[in-house]
Image (cartoon, grey):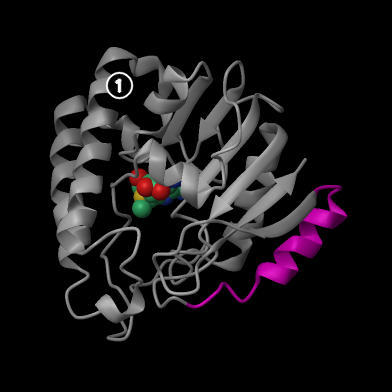
């Protein structure tokens, strides 16, 4: 599995994997979940990062879990890293604002408000329900086959394509499908340069060969220019 620094002035740069998160409302838009009734469903967020999604899904009646390698850290370290990475992630937009559409978020300050809200919800829920936040990572998740009805995966695959190679993407998607009983949803399909992942068709063919039904569906959310679709895989 290849890791490189991928330096390029025409793209958003972030050293390492950002431990940041989105709110439940952002996930609803990005993953096209607004019409999905989560009550009574088993849901996984992978990677969960500093997201408020698991808290929000649990509040809506789901049996929700999040998994992320960073969850091996203690509470204080996670909080500190979440705060530092949220600030660094927003600062990194300086000079590359043109890669983004400022509609859902008014401006970087508004984006920062969302990141801080997500982190606060994550920290409060992790403190209240630590068992819902599991340390682990792709491509080997610590869950049984078909453990979840719906598996969500945002801002890891495709986005970090400069440091995660094609073999990693194929193995990670197979693993997400293994732990899903009904569906996997992945967003975005673009990298930090706002280019769509060019191996997507190959990955879709591989998933079809494995008996899954992958398709790309538009979603009512676009921040990176052109990134307004998610990959939905029926398993
Ligand atoms: C940009 S955050 C995305 C978090 C969240 N899904 C979101 O959309 O805001 C990327 C996350 O991927 C996690 N990560 C890094 N390597 C991973 C792996 N091999 N498997 C699962 N998660 C990983 C990082 O710890 C980090 O929390």
- In this rendering, position of residue 186 left or right of residue 209: left
**x, y percent for residue 129:** 34, 14
Residue, far bottom: 9
Residue 78 colored in magenta in the image: no
Residue 35, quarter of the rendered image: top right
Please provide percent x and percent y for residue 51: 34, 38
Question: Which residue range is magenta in the image?
Answer: 195-212
The part of the image, by quadrant, that contains residue 78 is top left
Q: Which residue is rendered at x = 47% and y = 40% of the image? A: 137
Residue 222, compared with residue 100, is above or below; it is above
Q: Which residue is mark 1?
A: 125
113 sits to left or right of 211 = left
Residue at position x 39%, y 65% in the image: 223
Which residue is pictured at 32% across the width and 84% down the height? 8
| Residue 49 vs residue 185, the one in the foreground | 185
Residue 220 in view in this figure: yes
Q: Residue at the location (75% across, 62% down)? A: 204
Above or below 98: residue 33: above
Q: Tell me where residue 199 appears, x and y as whole percent.
A: 65, 72
Q: Residues within 10 Å of mark 1 (few under 14, many from 20)?
A: some
Question: Is 190 located above or below residue 217 in the figure?
Answer: below
Mark 1 near ligand 1 (CB under 8 Å)?
Answer: no
Q: Is residue 167 left or right of residue 1?
A: right
Disc 1 element = helix
* Picture layout, residue 13 above or below residue 69: below
């Amino acid at each position: 599995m290849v890791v490189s620094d991928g330096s390029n002035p025409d793209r958003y740069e972030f050293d390492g994997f950002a431990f940041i998160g989105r709110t439940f409302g952002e996930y609803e838009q990005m993953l096209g979940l607004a019409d999905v009734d989560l009550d009574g469903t088993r849901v996984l967020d992978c990677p969960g990062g500093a997201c408020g999604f698991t808290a929000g899904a649990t509040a809506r009646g789901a049996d929700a879990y999040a998994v992320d390698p960073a969850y091996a850290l203690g509470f204080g370290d996670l909080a500190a890293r979440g705060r530092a990475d949220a600030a660094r992630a927003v600062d990194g937009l300086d000079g590359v604002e043109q890669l983004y559409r400022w509609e859902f978020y008014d401006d970087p300050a508004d984006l920062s408000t969302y990141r801080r809200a997500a982190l606060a919800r994550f920290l409060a829920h992790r403190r209240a329900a630590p068992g819902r936040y599991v340390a682990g990572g792709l491509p080997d998740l610590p869950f049984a086959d078909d453990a979840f009805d719906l598996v969500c995966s945002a801002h890891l695959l495709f986005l970090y394509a400069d440091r995660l190679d094609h073999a990693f993407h194929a193995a990670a998607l197979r693993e997400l499908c293994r732990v899903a009983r009904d569906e996997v949803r992945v967003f975005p399909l673009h990298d930090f340069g706002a280019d769509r992942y060019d191996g997507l068709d190959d990955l879709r063919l591989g998933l079809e060969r494995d008996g899954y039904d992958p398709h790309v569906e538009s979603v009512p959310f676009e921040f990176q220019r052109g990134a307004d679709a998610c990959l939905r895989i029926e398993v």
